[in-house]
Amino acid sequence: MTSGQARVSVILANHNGARYIEAAIRSVQRQSLVDLEILVVDDASTDDSVDRVLKMARADARIRSLALPRNGGPATARNSGLDAAAGEWTAIVDADDLIHPRRVEQLLAAAEADGADMIADDLLNFHDDQPGANHRFLRGRRAGGPTWITLDDYLDETLLMRSPANLGYLKPMIRTAAWRASGVRYDECLRIG
C-alpha cells in the first residue's frame, strides 16, 4: 500500500437520497476499519442530498463528493466512483443502505484469508414503514454460510425477477487493481441490479 492510500474506498451512489444519505454515510464512518475513503457519487440529484454530503465532508476528510452532470443511474455512479477510487479495495454501498460497524473489516479479513479478489455478504431488506416485511436477502444454500460463487453460478442466479435471491443485488467488495485489470464495469444501460 502506498503512502496516503486508503485501504478501502467505499463508493456510495446517490440520487435524491436526502431522506437516508446521512444515516448511510454515518454507518460507513462508524466502521471498525477506519482506513477508508468514502466516495459519495451524486447522480444529478434535485433534492438537498448534495448539501448534506458536503456538510458531512467538511467534518470528515475521508468523505469526497463527486457530482455527475446528468442522471445516468446507479451503474454510471458506481463506474465513476471506481474511476476515482484510491483504495486497495473498493466496496459498494447505496444512499439508502446501512452497514454493520464491522462489515468492511470482516469482509476484508475473509477475502484475504481465502485469497479472493471479490467478496459479498447477505443483505437485510428492511422497510421502515412495514417492519413485518423485513427479511434476509439470501435463501437456500446461499443463506447457510460462506460459499464460493463461480461465474456460472452468478449468471444462473442473476436473472431479474426469476432468481430466488438475485446475486446482482449484493453489494460486493472487490480488490481495486483486479477489478480495473478485468475491464469489467457496471452496465450503464441497466437502471437496477
Image: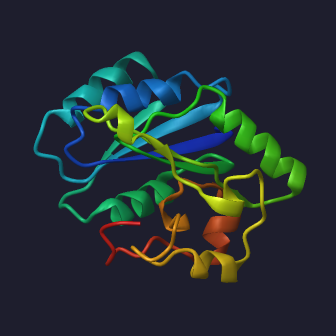
Whole-percent x, y for residue 44 in the image: 18, 52
Vertical order, 34 against 4 (above or below): above
Vertical order, 6 against 88 (above or below): above
Labels in figure, total: 0
The furthest residue to the left: 46
The furthest residue to the top: 59
Task: Evaluate whether residue 113 shows in this view.
Answer: yes
Whole-percent x, y for residue 137 in the image: 52, 52
Q: Quarter of the image holding residue 52?
A: top left
Q: Quarter of the image holding residue 60?
A: top left
Vertical order, 21 against 167 (above or below): above
Which residue occupies 65% across, 30% down? 35
Residue 18 in the figure: left or right of residue 27: left
Vertical order, 37 against 56 (above or below): below
- Picture quarter with the C terminus: bottom left
Which residue occupies 73% across, 52% down? 144
Foreground residue among 81 and 114: 114
The furthest residue to the front: 132
Residue 38 in the figure: left or right of residue 182: left
Task: Evaluate whether residue 4 shows in this view.
Answer: no
Which residue occupies 58% across, 30% down? 100
Foreground residue among 32 and 183: 32
Which residue occupies 35% across, 41% down? 95
Whole-percent x, y for residue 163 in the image: 50, 73
Whole-percent x, y for residue 107 in the image: 71, 43
